[in-house]
Image (tube, rainbow, N blue to C red):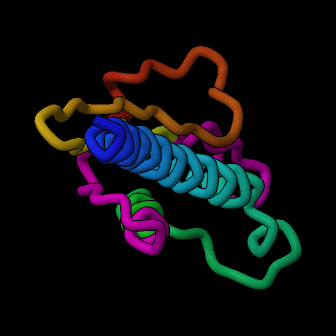
Amino acid sequence: MKAIKIVLGLAVFYVLFSAVWQISACELANYELKDDMQDMAAQLGLRVGLSEVPSDDELRDAVVSKAAKYGISLVPTQVTLLRDGYGKNAHMYFAADYSVSINLPGYSFDMHFNPSGGSKPRGAALASLQE
């Protein structure tokens, strides 16, 4: 009887540990992506003259590659970019929309994430600027 309790206790511990591990890994990756999006929206290289003005597609691809660095699978259509103005005086806003599947023994569920960075331009219509 004592052996059964130990085995059941270890099984419960494994399931809980696995769930906490997967969820915290997804949360950390989402936090890192959000931080990178904030940095991209700040346009530090552009403001000091170190880089050229990137196109919207280049910026979306940059978000996708940063997401891949953290194990997040994104496509450019999942990334929203709003831009108000042009050049070093532009305000940019990035947002992504994705889900991650959490797989546990006998049960799985999806966690939805929507990281964003920058400030939304005033008066910009989201649907008209999204491709």
Residue 26 spot, x, y in % from top left:
46, 49
Q: Residue furthest left?
A: 106
Residue 4 spot, x, y in % from top left:
26, 40
Left or right, 15 with reference to 62: left
User: Closest to the observer: 56 or 101?
Assistant: 101
The magenta stretch is: 65-94
Which residue is found at the position 45% from the left and 32% from the top?
114
Which residue is found at the position 46% from the left and 47% from the top?
17
Whether residue 68 is situated above or below residue 118 in the rendered picture: below
Q: Is 78 part of what is drawn in magenta? A: yes
Which residue is found at the position 42% from the left and 34% from the top?
113
User: Closest to the observer: 98 or 82?
Assistant: 98
Left or right, 81 with reference to 86: left
Residue 119, picture quadrant: top right
User: Closest to the observer: 98 or 50?
Assistant: 98
Residue 110 spot, x, y in % from top left:
25, 32
Residue 47 visible? The answer is yes
Image quadrant where one finds the N terminus: top left
Left or right, 76 with reference to 115: left
Whether residue 52 is situated above or below residue 71 in the rendered picture: below
Q: Is 108 part of what is drawn in magenta? A: no
Residue 3 spot, x, y in % from top left:
31, 46
Q: Residue furthest bottom?
A: 50
